[in-house]
Image: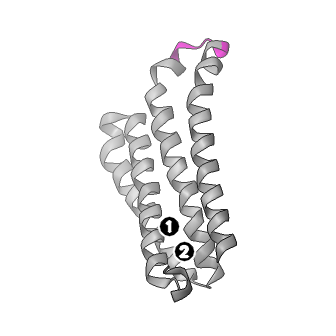
Amino acid sequence: VKYVRNYNREKGRTIIFLGILLCLLIFPVLLWLNKEEFNKDLMTYFIILLGNIMLNLSFIYHYLLYAYKKDRAILLPSLYAALMNLVLNILFVPNFGIIAAAWSTLFSFSFILFLKRKYWLKTKPRVWKK
């Protein structure tokens, strides 16, 4: 249990560190590319990056659920989030464009994290409840 907790803590720190690094590295990359169309959609990059951070954080719970053979608890959040993403994209992308797709992705990936964490908290054995 101790090793898994340390692994999860380290994985979470690594994901956050890489997210911050990617936030900082985008500016030199944009200067190097020198394309105005990339600069005007910079907010989209940050929203999608945050969404991907949420998705990667959900893998902490994903692996724990997998270890306890909770395949349904892994599958359902992905299915619900895919449906949510599809509905949000159909509703908002025609009017708001790529920024709406980015927000839809962020909400869907955050929903996956929320549900996997919820399922893990219901599943985890007593030894984890210290």
- Residue at left offset 39%, top offset 43%: 103
In contact (CB < 8 Å): disc 1 and disc 2:
yes
In this rendering, the label closer to the viewer, 1 or 2: 2
- Which is nearer the eye, 105 or 69? 69
- Which is nearer the eye, 116 or 79? 116
Q: How many circles with numbers are drawn on the protein?
A: 2
**Label 1 to label 2: alpha-carbon separation:** 7 Å
Position of residue 54 measured from the top left corner of the image (x, y, whole percent): 50, 53
- Which is nearer the eye, 119 or 106? 119
Position of residue 18 measured from the top left corner of the image (x, y, whole percent): 63, 41
Asked whether, in this view, residue 110 is left or right of residue 70, the answer is left
Q: Which residue is mark 1?
A: 78
Give the image's coloring scheme. one colour
The stretch of residues the image draws in magenta is: 32-37
- Residue at left offset 51%, top offset 88%: 126
- Residue at left offset 44%, top offset 41%: 102
Q: Which residue is mark 2?
A: 74
Asked whether, in this view, residue 32 is left or right of residue 24, the answer is right
- Residue at left offset 50%, top offset 18%: 39
Amino acid at the residue labelled 1: Ser
Residue 13 to residue 31: above or below: below
Amino acid at the residue labelled 2: Ile
Q: Residue furthest front?
A: 130
Residue 59 circle label: none
Label 1 sits on a secondary structure element that is: helix
Label 2 sits on a secondary structure element that is: helix
84 part of magenta stretch? no
Residue 114: name its quadrant: bottom left
